[in-house]
């Protein structure tokens, strides 16, 4: 076999092997980027309250003991309420200096207790009772994970359907006979409102008056949405 022919064969095979890659890299025309979104208001079904114990004492050991005793009593009381999840939050202490900032005159410590429940009335009443020993730091509402997942699953179908309608609309506007889906990305998002300062302030006032009933709670809602971002290729007649 002539040497020139032997050299040409590998070159021909190399060119043929590269054809699929060249086809993939070839420019694609009539592509359109589209976005569709489906959203709804979902009622909050989870209440979270953060209570804290804070005190100051010259003896750091005595201070830590007092804080621990206060928290343990609150935890024991909270565990007696069905449907309430109890957990400890952050705990920290720091020195308090004299006016010249040279000598430590006392220690200050703060420790948090976090409560969570789907039973707003029970948690509100429990929080009011614990305000005899603790103070409220934060109260907020949220959507439970299972509720959010269910809402997102329903919205996903709506978002995909809305994307398909927009794809058909874009195809007709361009005079196409149909379209192919090139890519599609689905993303979920939720907007959670900030804590409710009025409710927190009202619960703080219970600390001053014994026997005050738990406050009426209005949990509100958050917007949950699912977006569909994708690219279609319009087929021209």
Image: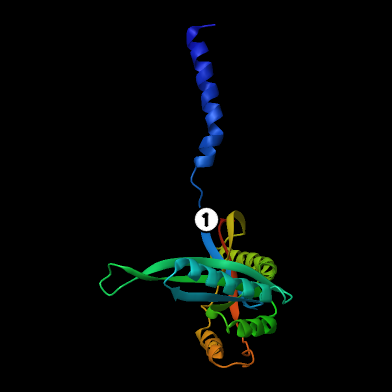
Query: Where in the figure is residue 196, as x and y percent of width and height?
Result: 53, 83
Farthest right residue in view? 82
Q: Residue at x 53, y 17 (%)?
A: 9
Query: Where in the figure is residue 52, as x and y percent of width and height?
Result: 53, 75
Q: Residue at x 53, y 91 (%)?
A: 208
Note whether 58 is above or below 133 in the view shown. Answer: above
Note whether 163 is above or below 222 in the view shown. Answer: above
Task: Look at the image and tell me whether residue 236 can be seen.
Answer: no
Question: Considering depth in this image, is 5 or 165 the residue closer to the camera?
Answer: 165
Q: Residues within 10 Å of mark 1 (few under 14, many from 20)?
A: some
Quarter of the figure with the C terminus: bottom right
Q: Tag 1's secondary structure?
A: strand
Question: Considering depth in this image, is 212 or 29 the residue closer to the camera?
Answer: 212
Farthest top residue in view? 1
Q: Which residue is mark 1?
A: 31
Query: Where in the figure is residue 126, as x and y percent of width and height?
Result: 65, 82
Task: Look at the image and tell me whether residue 52 can be seen.
Answer: yes
Total number of numbered labels?
A: 1
Q: Residue at x 58, y 84 (%)?
A: 132
Quarter of the figure with the N terminus: top right
Note whether 225 is above or below 22 in the view shown. Answer: below
Q: Is residue 237 left or right of residue 25?
A: right
Question: Considering depth in this image, is 23 or 183 the residue closer to the camera?
Answer: 183
Q: How is the image coloured?
A: rainbow
Q: Residue at x 52, y 24 (%)?
A: 14
């Amino acid at each position: 076999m002539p040497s020139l022919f032997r050299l040409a064969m590998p070159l021909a095979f190399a060119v043929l092997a590269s054809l699929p890659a060249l086809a993939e890299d070839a420019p694609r025309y009539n592509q359109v980027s589209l976005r569709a979104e489906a959203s709804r208001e979902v009622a909050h079904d989870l209440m979270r309250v953060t209570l804290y114990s804070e005190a100051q004492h010259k003896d750091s050991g005595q201070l830590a003991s007092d804080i621990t005793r206060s928290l343990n009593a609150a935890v024991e009381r909270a565990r007696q309420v069905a449907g309430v999840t109890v957990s400890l939050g952050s705990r920290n202490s720091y020195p308090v200096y004299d006016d010249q900032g040279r000598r430590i005159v006392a220690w200050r410590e703060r420790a948090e207790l976090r409560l969570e429940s789907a039973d707003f009335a029970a948690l509100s009443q429990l929080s009011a009772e614990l305000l005899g020993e603790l103070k409220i730091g934060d109260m907020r509402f949220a959507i439970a994970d299972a509720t959010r997942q269910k809402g997102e699953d329903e919205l996903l179908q709506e978002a995909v359907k809305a994307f398909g309608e927009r794809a058909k609309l874009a195809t007709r506007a361009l005079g196409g006979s149909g379209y192919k889906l090139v890519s599609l990305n689905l993303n979920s998002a939720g907007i959670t409102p900030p804590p409710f300062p009025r409710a927190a302030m009202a619960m703080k006032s219970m600390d001053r008056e014994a026997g005050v009933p738990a406050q009426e709670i209005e949990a509100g809602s958050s917007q949950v949405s699912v977006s569909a971002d994708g690219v279609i290729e319009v087929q021209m007649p």
